[in-house]
Amino acid sequence: MATSFEPVLLRNVGVKDSHTLKVYRARGGYEGLQKALALPPGDVVARVKDSGLRGRGGAGFPTGVKWTFLPKDHPGPIYMCINADESEPGTFNNRILMEDDPHQVIEGIIISSYATKAATAYLYIRVEYGLSFRRLQSAIDECYEAGLLGKNIQGKQGFHLDIHLHRGAGAYICGEETGLIESLEGKRAWPRIKPPFPAIEGVFRKPTIVNNIETMACVTHILDRGVDWFRSIGVPPDPSNPRDIGSLGPKLYCVSGHVNKPGCYEAPLGITVRELIDDFAGGVWKGRKAKACIPGGLSMGFLTEAEFDTRLDFNELQKKGCLGLGTAAVIVIDDQTSMIDVLYNSCRFFSHESCGQCTPCREGTAWMTKILARMRRGQGELSDLDQLAEIGGGIGLTPGTTICGLADGAAWPVKNAMQKFRPEFEEWIRSGRRSEDPLGELLAHH
Amino acid sequence: MPVLSETLRDKIKSYIPRYPSKQAVTLPALHLVQEELRCVPLEAMREIAELLDLHPAQVQDTMSFYGYFRDPDHKLGKHRVWICRSLSCMLRGGEELLRSLCDKTGLKPGETTRDGRVTLEFAECLGACEGAPCMLVDEECHMHVTPAQAMLKLAELE
């Protein structure tokens, strides 16, 4: 499978001036849009649904199914919100698409807006992505000039679309779709209680679809190359499980941490961690062995090295106790690294990024960080491990104590570490060792 | 005398047609103001509120949620330099990079040089993990940065 696979999402990356309309068109761009506009919008929704495309932003919800949740015959307006608040540690595939092939993303947005009858799309982009912002804005300007955005697009009477870029302000929670909506409305990014889901009542209290950047790029190719092409890639549905829709299509895997060639690699969904590290990322660095990895962005938890033959798809990771595939960003950790340091870093991140709305998340993430900080100072106690497991088990959507999933993402690495690396933590505590903290007193409170 | 210049007001107003609600212009307005004034003073929030038909407390509520925005007591320098401390960078020396910049500049993360030239910050994941450790200088991201290269970048800033 892997040998015959040709990159599609990354096919233009590395080509000179790949971000310009001229080059994109010369390489077959906007043909998917032509094919979409020849169909009624409902047929475009049906194709995306039939393709089995699942959202690439983290939750893996079927994209076409999400679109069908919009109210039928709604008088409008309906809004598209594109989530480019990519902030999950280890994840950078959206950035590469926006920087090097913005038209591929915009084509997907135009097709998706046509399908969902949205006349306005807001692309919410994290403020740190300066080059992405500039490349997208110049691509959007080119589209208006070429009649690909604006009124009666490509001569299609009644199909109007404007795309507006909206810059965030450095908050991870804006990647949560209702946090994004609140932020877009000009408020603090506190996620909303669901239902109602955004498809019923989203931004400006109107029906809204929130989709990820890579999802948009996939839509472009589903319309251009067809449903059968998309379904020929990846892991087909399990015939013995009627509820499984499989893990279909190409996927951008980000590999970072202790490998020789960190990077963004395109492969069929379902590649194993080991294949990704050895065949794409040049193996573990410095001739060392891996101890663990984060399989899908920080919030997904840990796999041990012994679990590296696990397929990176929408089903297999849960079977190993991880939260899921997430953003498919693999962070490799070598055998010289302390899991106490890794877990502290993880907890510190989530504590810093908790929006503060739900007490279990705000307090739980802060206390987990404090406990781990104490452990790193050589003052940990064995009972701390039970305390960590207890806090980890008590915060999040899983136990039902928070409004959004941030706390689940904070808890999962802790829960996995307590299940899979407990002996290392016990040995650390018993030894009374201290960890050299390069930042030490500089960051006392974060 | 208003804090926001006529030009700045016009820039803020130009965002209004993009959204069905004026409140949605809050973040663009805060960005425009901070870019020019290097912080968001209370008076500026009052004037933003007036432009967007909001209560000043609504603007303050939003502004204070996002750590990106600074009040006048924590005014930004001319340049803002971020060093990533999240896991992918931490595994490849991000924290040591930040430490070394702090030691050489005498700044703690969040502080600004006395001449008002540079504000040094820690960042959570900058999304450039393939180039860890990375640093963001204003709008430009630099990858695989050594402490010596980072100091050179800082020295180049005017």
Image (cartoon, coloured by chain):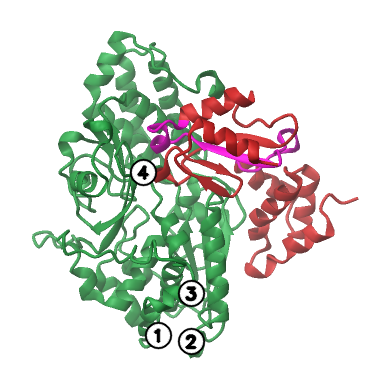
Chain colours: A green, B red
Distance of mark 2 from mark 3, alpha carbons?
15 Å
Q: Amino acid at mark 2?
A: Gln
> Of the residues under marks 2 and 3, which one precedes in the sequence?
3
Q: Amino acid at mark 4?
A: Leu
Q: Is residue A169 above or below residue A152?
A: above
Q: Which of the labelled discs sits on residue A397, or is there none?
A: 4
Q: Amino acid at mark 1?
A: Leu
Image mark count? 4
Distance of mark 4 from mark 3, alpha carbons?
43 Å
A146 displayed left or right of B15:
left
Q: Position of residue A408 (x, y in %)?
A: 36, 40
> Is any part of residue B124 visible from this angle?
yes
Q: Nearer the viewer, residue A55 or B59?
A: A55
Are discs 1 and 2 both within one chain?
A: yes
Q: Which residues are magenta?
A: B67-94
Residue labelled with disc 2: A154
Q: Amino acid at mark 3?
A: Leu
Distance of mark 2 from mark 4, alpha carbons?
44 Å
Q: Which residue is rendered at x = 41% and y = 20% of the image?
A: A371
> Of the residues under marks 1 and 3, which one precedes in the sequence?
3
